[in-house]
Every structure is written in C-alpha cells, then in structure tokens.
Image (tube, grey):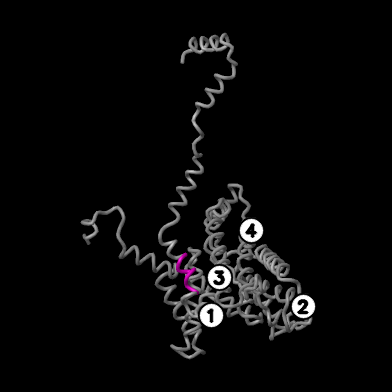
Amino acid sequence: MSAAQWRRAMRSGTAAGAPPRVLSTVATTALPMPAPTQASRDWLASMRRAIHLRHIAVLVIVLVFPFVSTPFITFQVVAQSLVLGLIALSLTFLAGYGGMISLAQMTVAGIAGYALAVLGTSNGADIALRWPWWVAVPFALFIATLCATLIGWLSVRTEGIYTIMITLAIGVAFYYLVLQNYSVFNGFQGLREVYPPKIFGIAWRDPVPFYFLCLACAMAGYFVVKWVVRAPFGIALQGIRDNPRRMAALGYHVVAHRVAAYALAGLLAAVGGVLLVWYNGLITPGSVSTSWLINILVVAVLGGMRHPIGAFFGALVFVLLQTFAIDLIDRERFNLLIGGVFFVIVLFSPDGLLGVWAALRARFGPRQGLTSNQRRQP
C-alpha cells in the first residue's frame, strides 16, 4: 500500500465515523504469530541428535536388570560397581579433564563415610550424635567436599609426581588418624551398624531399592560431568590441562579453576562414600587404606581416563574379578590377577577398555563416507 492510499483510507475511515483504532486493530490482527525461537529449535535438534536408540536400549536394560537378576548379582556386583565407579568418576574428571592425578579420592569418600557414621546413628564409638539422616547426610557431604577443597588448595600448586605424592601422603595420614583414634573413630574396628534409612516404608539396603539408589546417584554424577566438561568452566579446565601458562596469560585464574575442580570431584567422591558405608553397613580404616587408594586409580585407568562412562566399566571389571577370582586362583592371589589385567590393559590400550572398543570399531566397523565397493577394497 502506497502512502497516498494509506492517507485516503485514513480520511475515509474518519469521515465515516469509524474510530481511528479500528484500522490499527485490523492491521495488528493480520500479523502472523511469532514462530519458535532459533534457540528452542537448536535445543530440540541437539536433543534429537544426542538421544539414540542405543541410549534408550541401555536405559531399558538397567531398569529391568534387577527384576531378572539374582539378589547377589544385583547387590554384590552391580550395586558395588556403581558405588566404586562413582568414586572413580571423580578421579577420571580430575585426571582426564584437569590433568591432576589425585590418590586422595578414596580418602574423601572415607571422610564422608566417617562423618555420616559420627553424625548419624552408628555403634562402636563413644561419640554418636544420632542426627536424623536428612541432616547427617548433607553435613557429611559438606564436610567431605570442604576437605577435598583443602586438599586441592594444597596440591594444585604442584604437578606430576609431586601431586601424586602429596595426595598419597594425605591419604596415608588420614588412614593412621582413624586407625589410632578410639574416642571418635573406634580404631581398627571402625563404626558399625550404619544403614540407610527407611523412607516411604522402603528398606533401602535391600538389593533392588539399593540398586536403584546407586543407579540414580551414578547417573546424576555421570550427566553432571558430561555437562560440566562442555560448559565454559570445563572447557577452560581442559585448556589449563593442556597449557596452564597460556590460559593464565589469557586472564584465567589457573589455581581457582583447579581448586573448583577438586571441590566438584570431592562432591562426587563424597556421594560415593555415603553409598559405600551404607553398602557395607560399617566404615573401618581398611576402607581408606593404601590398597584402596591404589584400587580407585586402577579402576579409573582400566575403564579409560578420557571417558566418564569408563569409570563404571572399570569398576565392573574390578568387582567381577574381586568376586569370582576365588574360582580361578587362590584368594591370596587376587592382587596378582588384578595386576596382570592392569598391565595388559595399560600395555595394549593406554585409553583403557573403551580404548580397546574404539580400536575394534575403527578396525572392523564400516568406514563412513565410502561406498560398498570401496569398503571391500583392501
């Protein structure tokens, strides 16, 4: 419509006695409804690309598994693997995405377990505050996360073997602290009868409920790590891992990012520590001994340091060997078997079990972008 036609229409509408706002109302109603924003379309498209058929199949399998499996496999094997995998996930996050190998992750889990036993209900110590679980659990997680932050603050200024030695020294110091203290930690006997509460009439230490509790915590930890490593903080942390001097020159606070990574990893390990003390029903110095500090490192390396899901695969292999090694060799030879498996994995696949799977897919899987005739060619 030209300007002259617009003025003519306005004059005719006014002369006819029509209110001037009629035309504006008609023009407004003629406008199309706003289309979905580009951000919403991009989000939906990314969700379609991220969710595949295999993800749905895995979700169905893990939900149906406890109903078709025996209570022994559900509780002793799979639930324990999820707990150890969650603790190993904290180490995978630190080492794989932050370049910091810490041997104190089992120590952080032990701190959470001991804090829960002291603050909540337990048997064996002179001091038991007997707080309700909904108070004791958050306080235990907070104490363990705070200790992990302090451990990170002490160790982030070192690199390589020095970081390993500092975290190992902290773990050994905590082990001897709980071993020699009887008034609070009850010495080598530890704190017993630490069980999960009954909520909605459900005994959460029964195999099926405890499996779903561990599964929910493990999935939450896994998705948190997957989200963090794609967030600006995670990208900056990976840049600090590759070249801390350049990231500092760009204006990033290297120490603050590393300490924050220790805090997040400590929270994951603390959740695993609470689940571990509920799984065992007790917490003893043996749970935080040097052998378990090394076992968490073995679990993380077996699965693959570069993949968050690898921590759970490594934990599953470790628990299977630990459970059924007596059928293969003597119980006393278990560490020899674990050492042999660890040696083979590290020697032939530095990226762990998932590295083996990726190599097999690259070797025997179909090559994308090639025709069927080209795939047959050597």
The local crowd at label 1, few if under 14, some if 14 to 19, many if 20 or more residues have their Cα within 10 Å, is: some
Residue that appears at 43% across and 74% down: 345
Residue that appears at 59% across and 48% down: 249
Residue 340 located left or right of residue 184: left
Q: What element carries label 3?
A: helix
For mark 1, what is the residue? 76
For mark 3, what is the residue? 212
Q: Where is residue 132 in the image (x, y as percent from the top left)?
A: 74, 71
Instruction: Tell me which label, 2 or 1, sits earlier in the chain.
Output: 1
Q: Does the magenta stretch include residue 60?
A: yes
Amino acid type, residue under disc 1 in the picture:
Gln
Instruction: Tell me which label, 2 or 3, sits earlier in the chain.
Output: 2
Quarter-wise, where is residue 266 in the image?
A: bottom right
Q: What element carries label 2?
A: loop
Instruction: Tell me which label, 3 or 1, sits earlier in the chain.
Output: 1
Q: Distance between the residues labelled 4 and 1?
A: 33 Å
Q: What element carries label 1?
A: helix
Q: What stretch is highlighted in magenta?
A: 59-66
Q: Toward the viewer: 293 or 211?
A: 211
Q: Toward the viewer: 97 or 38?
A: 38
Amino acid type, residue under disc 4 in the picture:
Ala
Q: Distance between the residues labelled 2 and 1?
A: 28 Å
Quarter-wise, where is residue 187 in the image?
A: bottom right
All told, the count of numbered labels is 4
For residue 128, the mark is: 2
Residue that appears at 52% across and 63% down: 96
The local crowd at label 3, few if under 14, some if 14 to 19, many if 20 or more residues have their Cα within 10 Å, is: some
Q: Position of residue 354 (x, y in %)?
A: 43, 67
Q: Distance between the residues labelled 3 and 1?
A: 14 Å
Decide: marks 2, 3 in contact (CB < 8 A)?
no
